Image: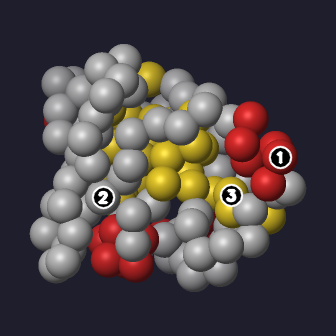
Amino acid sequence: MYLVLDGERHQIPNDGTFDHLWGDRSIIICKPEDAFHDIPVVNGLCPNTPIITSGGIDQYLMVRGKKRLLMDSCTTEHMQLKEDVAHEVPQCAMNAIPDGVVIKYGDCPGDVMAVNDDEDDVKGENKIWGHAIPRTGD
């Protein structure tokens, strides 16, 4: 299964990770593998604990070794993420993790899209398709 983010497929590494983030398998979009041939496969999500916080209101999705701020509740709702799934890490550890591009659903009222100053982080737009896509053969 994959999470499609920024026009790339990130593998969901195991059932525990899926259940931790989403739980509801009814959100899975089942399509033949070739239906997604234009969406490149990149590094997978961090197993079991891909959302982190330092105890404040900000939550981050770990993608490709960087923490990516989940901008607001509209973004997490659009991605269909469970509530209260973030794992707390000490602030000093949080500070040591490089920042990635902010994840923001483009239609949330009252906010603007994040500016991408690291072109290696993103392909396409900062929009989220918060659905898992099963791989064939699994």
Residue at 39 percent across and 72 percent down: it is 72
Instruction: Establish if 104 lies above or below 122.
Output: below
Instruction: Establish if 52 lies above or below 137.
Output: below
Residue at 32 percent across and 77 percent down: it is 74
- Pointer 1 local density, CA inside 10 Å: few below 14, some 14–19, many at least 20: few
Determine whether label 3 and label 2 are within 8 Å by CB: no
Q: How is the structure coloured here?
A: secondary structure
Q: Which residue is mark 1?
A: 92
Indicate which disc, 3 or 2, sits on the residue closer to the N terminus. Answer: 3
Instruction: Establish if 86 lies above or below 136.
Output: below
Give the CA separation, mark 2 to mark 1: 25 Å
- Pointer 3 local density, CA inside 10 Å: few below 14, some 14–19, many at least 20: many
SS at mark 1?
helix
Residue at 36 percent across and 52 percent down: it is 103
Instruction: Choose top left, top right, bottom left or bottom right for residue 5.
Output: top left
Q: Which residue is mark 3?
A: 52
Q: Amino acid at mark 3?
A: Ile
